[in-house]
Image (spheres, rainbow, N blue to C red):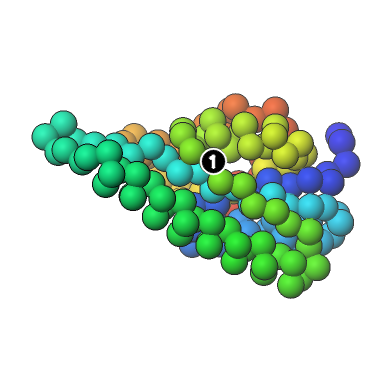
Amino acid sequence: MKRIRQILHATDFSPASRRAFDSALSMAKSLNARVTFVHVLPPIVMIPDQYLDAVTLDRLDRQAREWSMKQLDRLVARAKKQGVKAVRMLRSGDPAGQIVAGCRASKSHLIVLGTHGRRGVPKFFLGSVAERVVSLASCPVLTVRGK
C-alpha cells in the first residue's frame, strides 16, 4: 500500500461530514499528510412547470458558490490552526463522480467522507453518494458514520 501523503475529504457541510472532517484531520496529523477539502455543487434541478430565467439561475449559482467557498475556507482555517496543510476545491456536477475526479486531480491516496446512514425508501430515492464513491474510487475510501 502507498504511503498516504494526500487525503481528500469530501464534505456537504452536514453533521456526518463534520465527523468525517475530524477523522480526516486526525489521520492527516498522524501521517503528516496534506488535506484537500472538496465540496460538489449538484446541478440545479427544475420542475417542468417552473421557469427561472438565466439571470436568476446565474444569481443562484453565484450565491451557492460564494457560500460554499466560505464554508471551505473555514475548514481550511481550522485545519491550518491544528497544523495540517490544507487546500480547498469546489466542483460541480454529479457528487460521486466529481469526488472521484477531485481525488485524481489532487493526487490523493485516500478519500474520507461521511455517510448519513440512510436505509430503505430514503436511500432508494436519495441514493448513497458514499456507496457510489466506494465503487468508483481507485484508492481506499474511509466512510465515517454521521450518527
Name the residue located 14 percent from the left edge and 38 percent from the top edge: 50
Name the residue located 55 percent from the left edge and 52 percent from the top edge: 11
- Pointer 1 residue: 91
In the visual, does 59 lie left or right of 13? left
Crowding at mark 1 (Cα within 10 Å: few <14, some 14-19, many 20+): some
Instruction: Pick whichever, 11 or 122, lies toward us.
Output: 11
Q: Secondary structure at mark 1?
A: strand
In the visual, does 101 lie left or right of 31? left
Residue found at the very far front of the displayed protein:
55
Q: Position of residue 124 (x, y in %)?
A: 34, 34
> Is residue 118 shown above or below 82?
above
Q: Position of residue 62 (x, y in %)?
A: 41, 50
Q: Is residue 101 visible?
A: yes
Instruction: Pick whichever, 133 or 43, lies toward us.
Output: 43
Q: Is residue 121 visible?
A: no
In the visual, does 26 lie left or right of 100? right
Q: Position of residue 64 (x, y in %)?
A: 41, 52
Instruction: Pick whichever, 65 or 2, lies toward us.
Output: 65
> Is residue 99 shown above or below 19?
above
Instruction: Pick whichever, 121 or 24, lies toward us.
Output: 24
Figure label count: 1
Q: Position of residue 104 (x, y in %)?
A: 70, 32
> Is residue 130 shown above or below 138?
below
Quadrant placement of the N terminus: top right
Name the residue located 54 percent from the left edge and 30 percent from the top edge: 97
Q: Amino acid at mark 1?
A: Arg
